[in-house]
Amino acid sequence: MRPIRTVALAALLPVAVVHAGPETHGRYLTLVNREYESVISLEIAGAGSEAFRELPLAPPLAGGGGSTTVRIAVDGCRHDLRFVFKDGRRLLYRDVDVCRYDRLRIRGLPHGSEDGQAVAGSPSRR
C-alpha cells in the first residue's frame, strides 16, 4: 500500500509546482496618499521606458492618509509610477525599486503646481 501512496503523491507534486508559479510572480506595493486630493489613476512603466499601463484603483485612493496595496505583476524591480489626482494634476516617481521597498508615500505637490516629479532615492518610499 505504501508504494501506491508515494506514486500518487509524486503524480500530484508537479501540478502543485506549476500552479504555484504564477501566484508567486509579482510584487506588492502599499501606497499611502499624503496629498490632500484623491488619486484616481495609477500607471506603471519599466524605468525610463515611457510605456505606461494602468493599474486599477477602485475606489480612488483617498487623500489625507488613505492607503491601499497594489500588485505589480511585471518583471523587473525598477519602475516609473505615475499618479493622476482628481483635480487633474500628475505626479511621477521615477526608478522606484519595488524589490527593495514595499511602501510608497505619495507626497503632496505644492499648491498651484500642474505636474510634479519625484526623484529616485526619495525618503517618501520608506
Image: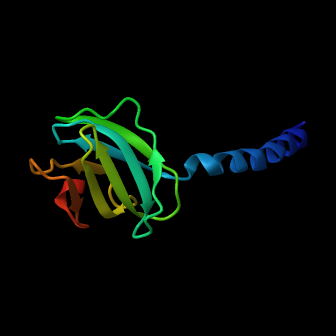
Q: Position of residue 48 (x, y in %)?
A: 40, 70
Question: Visible in this render: residue 126?
Answer: no
Q: Position of residue 111 (x, y in %)?
A: 9, 47
Q: Position of residue 93 (x, y in %)?
A: 29, 59
Question: Visible in this render: residue 70?
Answer: yes
Q: Position of residue 114 (x, y in %)?
A: 19, 52
Count the labels in the image. Answer: 0
Residue farthest to the top, as pictured: 59
Point 37% across, 29% down: residue: 59
Point 15% across, 50% down: residue: 109
Among the 4 quarters of the image, the one containing residue 120? bottom left
In the image shown, does 49 or 123 lie closer to the viewer? 49
In the image shown, does 17 or 116 lie closer to the viewer? 116
Q: Is residue 82 above or below residue 6?
A: below
Quadrant showing the C terminus: bottom left
Q: Is residue 99 above or below residue 19?
A: below
Q: Is residue 18 above or below residue 77?
A: above
Quadrant showing the N terminus: top right
Point 56% across, 53% down: residue: 25
Residue farthest to the left, as pictured: 111
Position of 64 compared to 38: left or right?
left
Point 63% across, 49% down: residue: 22
Position of 26 compared to 109: left or right?
right
In the image shown, does 44 or 5 lie closer to the viewer? 44
**Which colour style is shown?**
rainbow
Position of 19 compared to 55: left or right?
right
Among the 4 quarters of the image, the one containing residue 69? top left
Position of 69 compared to 111: left or right?
right
